[in-house]
C-alpha cells in the first residue's frame, strides 16, 4: 500500500492517492508540500483537490494527532486508545488485535440491527470498544468533524442533461484510467450487465492497461446465464472473454474464511465458492488488481420507485403532473398512474420503508431501526425522497470493502465508487438519472456509443437464486446445527422453530428465502468467530 509522507514530520497519507483531473501518477513532493497548514486545511486540500482510497494520519502544529478518512470510504479506519496510546487500523490481524486488550465486546443490539438490515454494515460497529472514523470525517482528540457529506452534492442539482452525461463520462474515464495506468496486471469482471460493461469500456480506452483476464461467470440456469450479453460486450470491445461456470460448492459455514474475521462482516466474501474461485483464477493469470462494476446500481439509479416522480414534482411544480414522467414511472414500477399522482401530491415518501430489506420470517421481533446511525444521514431532510434513498443505499456500499480471500489475493478496486464518480452522480437528480422511465437511463445514453445495443437496451437482470438454493440444500447437514444451535438463536434473535421448518429441502424449493438464510449463516459465523477470539484474548490478558 503506498505511503505519502508529509514534510516536517506532520504525518503520512496511507493508500491510493490521485489528483483530480490527472490520470498520471501523483508527485510525492506535491503531497509533502501541503504540510505547512493546520490538519483541518490538510484534510480540505485532500478532499477537494485529490481522491483515492486513503487515510491521512496527521499531527497538528501543537503535536495533537488527527485522522482523515477519504470520502469514498474505500479504506476502512477504526481507532481505539490503550495505555495512553491512540491506535488506528483498517484491519485487525491477530497481533494488532492483542494490542486492543480486553476492552472489545460484542454489541448485541447492533448485531440485531445487522441481522434485520445488512445495509447497516457501513454504520456503527457491532464490536464495542472500537471507534469507527466515517468516510469524509476528520478525527481529533476534541471530537469528530464531518467535512464531506453526500447531501452537499445532492443539494446542488445539475439540470442540464448534456452536462450531466458529459460529467459522468469524464469522471468514470478519469477514475478508471487512474487505476488502469498504474501498470499492475488486471483481472476485469464482465458480468453481462451495464455497470461492469461501462468499466470495461473505460479500461479499453487506456493504452497502458495490462488486462490479463476478462472474466465472466455464468450459471447453467437460463436466468443465470448472461454469456450472450458478455460475449456481445467482448465483441464490441475486441477482447477475449474467459467463461467460468459459477461454483456449485455446497454452503459450508466453515468456508467463509477471512470474510468473517474482519471487524465488519465482509459481505463481499459471503459467497465462498466465488471467493475461492476468483482468487485462484486471478493468481493463475498473474493478476495483481481486480476491477469491478460494483456500486453502479446505486449511483446510476437502478431501483424502480415512485419516489422518482416525487422528486420530479418537487423540482418542476404542478407542470410535472402533465409531463410524461408519472405515466412512465407507473409503467416502470408496475403501479397505477393514480397512485403515482397521489404520491406526487403528497410530495414525500417513507424512504426507510422503501429501501430497507424485508426482515426474514425467522427473525424475532425485528428491532426498531434508528432513523440515522451513519453521519451521512444526519442532513438529508431537505433532499427529495429519491435522493435520500440513493444516499441511504450508498452507506451500504461498505459491503464491498473488508477482508476476504480475493481481496487478499488481488487489489480489489471498485472505480464506480470513487469520490469523483460519487459526487457527480449525487449531483444528478433522480428523475434525470432515470429520465423518468427506466433504471440507469442516463448512464445508458452516456455510454451508448461504446457498448452494444443488446446491453444498452437490456431490461432483464441475471438471477442466481436457483443456484444458491441448490447450494444451500446441499449444505443443510452443516447449516442446520450451525444455525439452530447457534448464538443468534441462543440470544433470542432468531425463532428456532420457524427457521427449523425453513431448513427443509422441500420448504426451500417452495418457499425460498435463500438470501436470508445464507446471510444469517454468515452473520452467525462472524459472531462465533469474534466471540471465540475475544474469549481467547481475555484469557491471555488475564494470564499476563
Image (cartoon, rainbow, N blue to C red):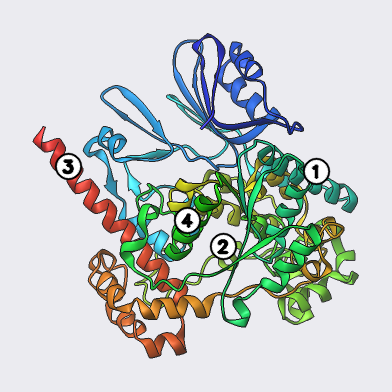
* Above or below, comparing residue 426 to residue 336 in the picture: above
Secondary structure type for disc 3: helix
Q: Nearer the viewer, residue 424 or 107?
A: 424
Q: Earlier in the sequence, mark 4 or mark 3?
A: 4
Q: State the mark number for residue 210.
A: none
Q: Are marks 3 and 2 in contact (CB under 8 Å)?
A: no
Residue 478: % across, % down: 28, 73
Q: State the mark number for residue 280.
A: 4
- Could you tell me which residue is drawn at 30 percent across and 57 percent down? 527
Q: Nearer the viewer, mark 1 or mark 3?
A: 1
Residue identifier under label 3? 538
Q: Nearer the viewer, mark 1 or mark 2?
A: 1
Residue identifier under label 2? 352
Residue 505: % across, % down: 37, 87
Q: Are marks 1 and 3 in contact (CB under 8 Å)?
A: no
Q: Quadrant of the C terminus?
A: top left
Q: Nearer the viewer, mark 4 or mark 1?
A: 4
Amino acid at each position: 500500500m503506498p505511503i505519502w509522507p508529509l514534510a516536517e514530520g506532520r504525518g503520512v497519507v496511507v493508500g491510493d492517492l490521485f489528483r483530480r483531473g490527472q490520470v498520471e501518477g501523483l508527485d510525492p513532493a506535491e503531497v509533502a508540500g501541503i504540510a505547512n497548514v493546520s490538519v483541518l486545511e490538510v484534510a480540505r486540500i485532500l478532499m477537494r483537490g485529490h481522491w483515492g482510497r486513503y487515510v491521512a494520519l496527521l499531527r497538528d502544529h501543537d503535536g495533537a494527532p488527527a485522522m482523515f478518512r477519504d470520502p469514498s470510504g474505500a479504506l476502512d479506519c477504526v481507532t481505539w486508545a490503550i495505555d495512553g496510546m491512540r491506535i488506528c487500523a483498517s484491519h485487525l490481524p491477530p497481533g494488532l488485535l492483542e494490542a486492543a486488550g480486553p476492552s472489545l465486546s460484542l454489541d448485541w443490539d447492533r448485531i440485531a440491527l445487522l441481522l434485520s438490515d445488512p445495509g447497516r454494515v457501513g454504520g456503527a460497529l457491532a464490536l464495542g470498544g472500537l471507534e469507527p472514523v466515517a468516510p469524509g470525517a476528520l478525527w481529533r482528540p476534541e471530537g469528530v468533524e464531518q467535512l464531506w457529506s453526500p447531501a452537499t452534492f445532492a443539494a446542488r442539482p445539475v439540470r442540464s442533461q448534456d452536462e450531466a452525461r458529459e460529467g459522468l463520462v469524464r469522471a468514470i474515464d478519469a477514475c478508471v484510467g487512474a487505476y488502469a495506468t498504474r501498470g499492475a496486471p488486471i483481472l476485469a469482471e464482465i458480468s453481462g450487465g451495464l455497470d461492469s460493461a461501462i468499466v470495461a469500456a473505460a479500461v479499453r480506452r487506456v493504452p497502458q492497461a495490462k488486462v490479463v483476464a476478462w472474466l465472466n461467470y455464468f450459471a447453467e440456469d437460463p436466468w443465470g446465464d448472461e454469456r450472450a450479453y458478455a460475449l456481445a460486450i467482448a465483441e464490441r470491445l475486441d477482447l477475449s472473454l474467459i467463461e467460468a461456470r459459477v461454483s456449485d460448492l455446497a454452503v459450508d459455514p466453515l468456508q467463509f474464511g477471512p470474510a468473517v474475521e474482519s471487524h465488519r462482516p465482509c459481505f463481499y466474501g459471503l459467497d465462498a465458492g466465488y471467493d475461492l474461485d476468483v482468487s485462484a483464477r486471478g493468481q493463475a493469470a498473474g493478476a495483481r488488481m481486480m476491477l469491478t462494476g460494483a456500486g453502479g446500481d446505486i449511483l446510476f439509479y437502478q431501483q424502480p420507485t415512485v419516489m422518482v416522480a416525487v422528486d420530479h414534482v418537487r423540482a418542476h411544480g404542478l407542470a410535472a403532473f402533465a409531463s410524461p414522467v408519472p405515466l412512465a414511472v407507473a409503467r416502470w414500477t408496475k403501479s397505477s398512474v393514480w397512485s403515482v399522482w397521489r404520491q406526487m401530491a403528497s410530495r414525500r415518501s417513507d424512504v426507510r420503508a422503501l429501501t430497507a430489506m424485508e426482515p426474514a420470517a425467522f427473525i424475532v421481533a425485528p428491532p426498531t431501526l434508528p432513523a440515522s446511525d451513519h453521519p451521512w444521514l444526519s442532513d438529508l431532510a431537505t433532499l427529495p425522497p429519491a435522493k435520500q434513498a440513493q444516499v441511504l443505499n450508498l452507506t451500504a456500499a461498505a459491503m464491498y470493502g473488508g477482508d476476504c480471500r480475493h481481496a487478499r489475493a488481488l487489489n480489489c478496486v471498485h472505480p464506480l465508487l470513487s469520490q469523483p464518480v460519487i459526487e457527480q452522480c449525487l449531483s444528478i437528480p433522480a428523475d434525470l438519472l432515470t429520465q423518468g422511465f427506466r433504471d440507469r437511463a442516463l448512464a445508458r445514453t452516456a455510454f451508448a456509443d461504446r457498448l452494444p445495443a443488446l446491453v444498452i437496451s437490456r431490461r432483464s437482470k441475471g438471477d442466481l437464486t436457483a443456484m444458491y438454493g441448490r447450494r444451500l440444500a446441499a449444505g443443510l447437514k452443516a447449516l442446520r446445527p450451525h444455525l439452530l444451535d447457534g448464538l443468534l438463536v441462543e440470544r433470542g434473535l432468531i425463532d428456532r422453530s420457524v427457521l427449523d421448518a425453513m431448513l427443509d429441502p422441500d420448504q426451500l424449493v417452495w418457499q425460498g428465502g435463500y438470501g436470508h438464510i445464507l446471510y444469517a449463516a454468515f452473520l452467525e459465523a462472524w459472531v462465533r468467530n469474534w466471540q471465540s477470539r475475544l474469549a481467547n484474548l481475555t484469557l491471555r490478558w488475564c494470564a499476563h
